[in-house]
Amino acid sequence: MEDSQNTSQHIRRYTVAEASEVLGVSQAAIRARIHRETLDTERIDGTVYVLLSVEQIAHHTDEKSLDVIELLREQSTDLREQLSILREQLAAEREANRENRRIIAGLVQRVPELEAASGPRESAATASETEAKGAVAQESAESEIRQSFWRRLFGGSGT
């Protein structure tokens, strides 16, 4: 008598939907197992109940755990690869940052040289102004020559 009570305590009754959730398979898979008679069932008031023992649930949980462990291993491998790529990118960015700092330091050192060179720039501007004035004077002389040529050709009077 104790054996039947012990066995009944280890078997639970589930609807098809509940059994599919507990076993982690679709309801169609549960129905197929019922049809193949690989799962014990019981019909009460038109409702089909699947009888699952603790061992069946534990066995399925162990298989599911192995699947989860394998999935986690794959994901951890992918994450390690991504981490490696990100470390390489970080190292490249740090090297570029070092190069930029070196360039900036070189430019900062040249600032006093550039400020000292600003004096000759003003004299260079003055020289270019002198050149511009000379060019204007040359143009006016050329225009007088042209004008006199036309006056000579047509007999115009000079001013």
Image (spheres, helix red, strand yellow):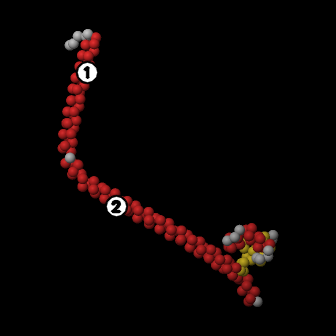
Q: Tag 2: residue type? A: Arg
Where residue 155 appears, as percent x and y from the top left, is 26, 10
The quadrant of the rendering that contains the N terminus is bottom right
Secondary element type, mark 1:
helix
Residue occupying image coordinates x 72% and y 78%: 52
Nearer to us of marks 2 and 1 is: 1
Where residue 157 appears, as percent x and y from the top left, is 23, 10
The residue singled out by tag 2 in the image is 98
Mark 1 burial class by Cα count in 10 Å: few <14, some 14-19, many 20+: few
Q: CA distance from mark 2 to mark 1?
A: 61 Å
35 or 129: nearer the viewer = 129
**Does residue 112 appear left or right of residue 6 in this picture?**
left
**Does residue 150 appear left or right of residue 24 in this picture?**
left
Q: Height in image: 134 above or below 53?
A: above
Q: How many marks?
A: 2
The quadrant of the rendering that contains the C terminus is top left
The residue singled out by tag 1 in the image is 143
Q: Residue furthest front?
A: 153
27 or 158: nearer the viewer = 158
The answer to whether residue 157 is visible is yes
Secondary element type, mark 2:
helix
Residue occupying image coordinates x 47% and y 68%: 84
Q: Height in image: 4 above or below 138?
A: below
Marks 2 and 1, the one that precedes in the sequence: 2
Q: Tag 1: residue type? A: Ser
**Does residue 62 appear left or right of residue 137 in this picture?**
right
